[in-house]
Image (cartoon, rainbow, N blue to C red):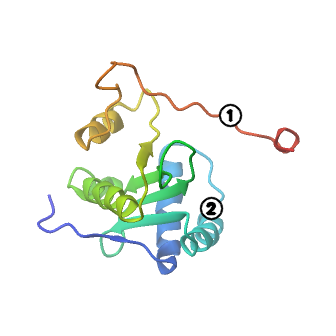
Amino acid sequence: MYDHISARVATPADAARMADLLDAFNREYGMPSPGPSVLAGRLHELLSGTTTFAVVAGEPVISVGVVTIRTNVWVDGGIALLDEMYTTPAERSRGLGGAVLTAAVAEAARRGVGEFEIEVDEPDVDAHRFYGRHGFPVRDATTGDRAFVLRKELSGSEAR
């Protein structure tokens, strides 16, 4: 455990290091990645706007959380979605991820966001436990219903 864990809101200057981490994340889990240079360009652009922010920890950065904010008819201030979260394997279980998540939720609240969402694949029981410890249960406390987020990728012809 780190004696003093400091997480901060990232700036566009952090884009290259964040891109390296997110590329490593996808490679670790056998997922495709456009590569660090493409990711760095995208992150720099996104972090320069108002609908995306990131929280990082470590010097150099070894933990990252990327959050996007979208408007919503039911929720004042919109909904924040934790799009990506990654801590380098050697630094896991030391509190960095918790610090990043806590800071991301606080930053979303500071920005006036009304709800915070996290998508987790069903078999990822470690992530379910982690997010549950931080107030994001897999089941609704009132109804007992399981949480689901459904998605469909759109090809060029479907998006028109």
Question: Residue 104: which disc?
Answer: none
Residue 135, image x, y percentages: 27, 41
Amino acid bearing label 1? Lys
Under circle 2, the secondary element is: loop
* Alpha carbon distance from label 1 to label 2: 23 Å
Query: For the C terminus, which image quadrant?
Result: top right
Disc 1 marks which residue? Answer: 152
- Residue under the image location 34 percent in, 19 percent down: 143
- Residue under the image location 66 percent in, 58 percent down: 34
Q: Is residue 138 above or below residue 85?
A: above
Disc 2 marks which residue? Answer: 35
113 sits to left or right of 44: left
Circle 1 residues within 10 Å: few <14, some 14–19, many ≥20: few
Circle 2 residues within 10 Å: few <14, some 14–19, many ≥20: some
17 sits to left or right of 96: right
Please state which of residues 143 and 84 is positioned toward the viewer in this rendering. 143
- Res 109 → quadrant: bottom left
Mark 1 or mark 2: name the one nearer the start of the chain: 2
- Res 157 → quadrant: top right
Residue 28, image x, y percentages: 47, 48
- Residue under the image location 52 percent in, 74 percent down: 16
